Every structure is written in structure tokens, then in C-alpha cells.
Amino acid sequence: MNASDLGRSIKAVRRQRGFTLKYLQKNTGVHYTQISKMERGGCKLLSKNLLTICNFLHISHAPDSQLVPSESVVDTVQAIIRSWPQSEGLIRHFLEGIEMALEGGCRTDGHGQRLP
């Protein structure tokens, strides 16, 4: 794998998820001009900032690996909570609703409360 291929993958995943360069800067601490440079292939493969961006986007940065986003639900939920701590309550509420529905096929009012 070379820096150009990795940069294209970073850009593709970022766009697929609807992230702007400024959003990545805010959530990773890596300046948006550096991220832009990475996307153009202008960085070292062992750069600390590159590893930070790859980890945030769940892109493998290991040499000669297939560049695919992580499919781990746990990793995705943890990344969401890290980037938006207030989301933890929403995620818990969502999961409680799913658990309730699985317990008996019950209907809820959209706030997790069972309907008759």
C-alpha cells in the first residue's frame, strides 16, 4: 500500500460518511490542511496524525492490507460516543426499545414506553 492509495481511501470513507475536513479536525485534533494533504497522498505512512485519522474512520493503515472500514458494531458505537458523548443516552434508549420489542413483539410509543 502506498500513501496515494491510503489517501484515496480516507477521502472516500470521509465523504461516504458525510464528514467534512473541519469535522475530522474537531474530532481528531488533526488540522484540516493536514487531512487534505493525507487525502492527496502527501504524507508518511507512519505519521501519528495519519494513524489518528485512520483509527477514527476505522480504516486499516497496515501495509499490504485491504482497506475496508471496520464492520464491528461495538467499534462504531464507541466511535460515535467518543465523537458525540451526548449520544450515549440516545443509543442506550434505542437499545432498550429493541430489547423490549424482542421480549414479546410489543409496540412502543417511540419513547420506549409500551403501548397496549
Image (cartoon, grey):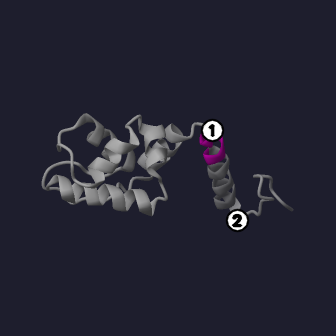
Q: Amino acid at mark 1?
A: Gln
- The quadrant of the image that shows the C terminus is bottom right
Residue 31: quadrant of the picture: top left
2 or 1: mark nearer the eye:
1
Q: Quadrant of residue 13?
A: bottom left
C-alpha gap between disc 2 and disc 1: 29 Å
Numbered disc 1: secondary structure: loop
Q: Residues within 10 Å of mark 1 (few under 14, many from 20)?
A: few
User: Magenta segment: does it hold 88?
Assistant: yes
Q: Measuring 21% from the left and 45% from the top, which residue is drawn there?
A: 43
From this viewpoint, which residue is outermost toward the front? 33
Up-down: is 59 above or below 48? Answer: below
* Vertical position of residue 114 compared to residue 46: above or below: below
Q: Which mark is residue 86?
A: 1
- The reply to whether residue 55 is visible in this rendering is no
Magenta stretch containing residue 95, yes or no?
Answer: no
Query: Which residue type carries mark 2?
Result: Gly
Query: Which segment is the magenta one?
Result: 87-91
In the depicted view, which residue is nearer to us: 70 or 27?
A: 27
Q: Position of residue 11 (x, y in %)?
A: 34, 58
x, y percent for residue 91 = 61, 47
Which residue is rendered at x = 39% and y = 43% of the image? 32
Residue at mark 2: 105
Q: Position of residue 74 (x, y in %)?
A: 44, 47
Residue at 84% across, 60% down = 115
Task: Give the answer, above or below, for where 13 lies relative to 37.
Answer: below
State the quadrant of the N terminus: bottom left
On the question of residue 15 being in view, the answer is yes
Crowd band around label 2 with a 10 angstrom C-alpha radius: few (<14), some (14–19), many (20+): few
Q: Position of residue 24 (x, y in %)?
A: 44, 45
